[in-house]
Amino acid sequence: MTLWFVRGLRRGVVTTRYPARPDESARFLPAPPAFRPGALTLAVAGRLAETCPSGALHVVQEEDGGVLVFDVGRCTACGRCAAEAPQAVTSSGAFELAATDRSVLIKRITLRGEEQ
Ligand code: SF4
């Protein structure tokens, strides 16, 4: 313990400057997905919802098409959805997801028709 104290005094601050400055290592952290709406069909969205182990994704069918509902608050950033459909899903790179209102963590992505 004394050794670490002395070492800290000698070297100064050894932790990162986060959150005052972005941390370089943040780009290597797992992050929730971002979706490419142009590549999301009802079928692809259905596969994503089935793949998601935490229930963060589900499809709502509506009269004029469908919507992929993404609950970021349930996402564990496991990456299974991106592995399932890499053409439609990528990493958002965002991991600072604290919110004071739970509803802002729920995203609705309109699905394009199958024929497009
Ligand atoms: S990263 Fe994992 S938990 Fe998050 S939406 Fe994709 S499959 Fe679900």
Image (spheres, rainbow, N blue to C red):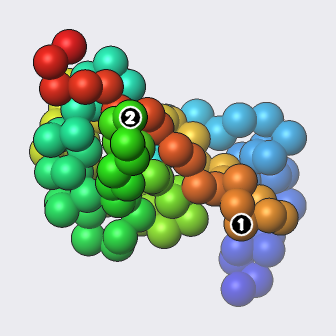
Residue 39: x %, y % from top left: 26, 23
> Which residue is found at the position 79% from the left and 74% from the top?
5
Give residue 57's quadrant in the image. bottom left
Judged from this view, the residue extending furthest toward the front is: 63
In this rendering, position of residue 90 left or right of residue 17: left
Residue 73: x %, y % from top left: 56, 65
Identify the image quadrant of the C terminus: top left
Residue 86: x %, y % from top left: 19, 32
Callout 2 secondary element? loop
User: Does mark 1 have its CB less than 8 Å from ligand 1?
Assistant: no
Q: Amino acid at mark 2?
A: Asp
In this rendering, position of residue 28 left or right of residue 47: right
Say which mark, if any, is on residue 64. Answer: 2
Residue 114 visible in the current orientation: yes
Q: Is disc 1 in contact with disc 2, using a CB cutoff of under 8 Å?
A: no
Identify the image quadrant of the N terminus: bottom right
**Mark 1 crowdedness (10 Å alpha carbons): few <14, some 14-19, many ≥20:** few
User: Residue tagged by mark 1?
Assistant: 102
As rendered, which of 113 and 56 lies closer to the eye? 113
As rendered, which of 12 and 81 lies closer to the eye? 81
Callout 1 secondary element? helix
Q: Amino acid at mark 1?
A: Arg
Q: Is residue 80 above or below residue 84?
A: below
> Which residue is found at the position 81% from the left and 52% from the top?
13
In this rendering, position of residue 22 left or right of residue 83: right
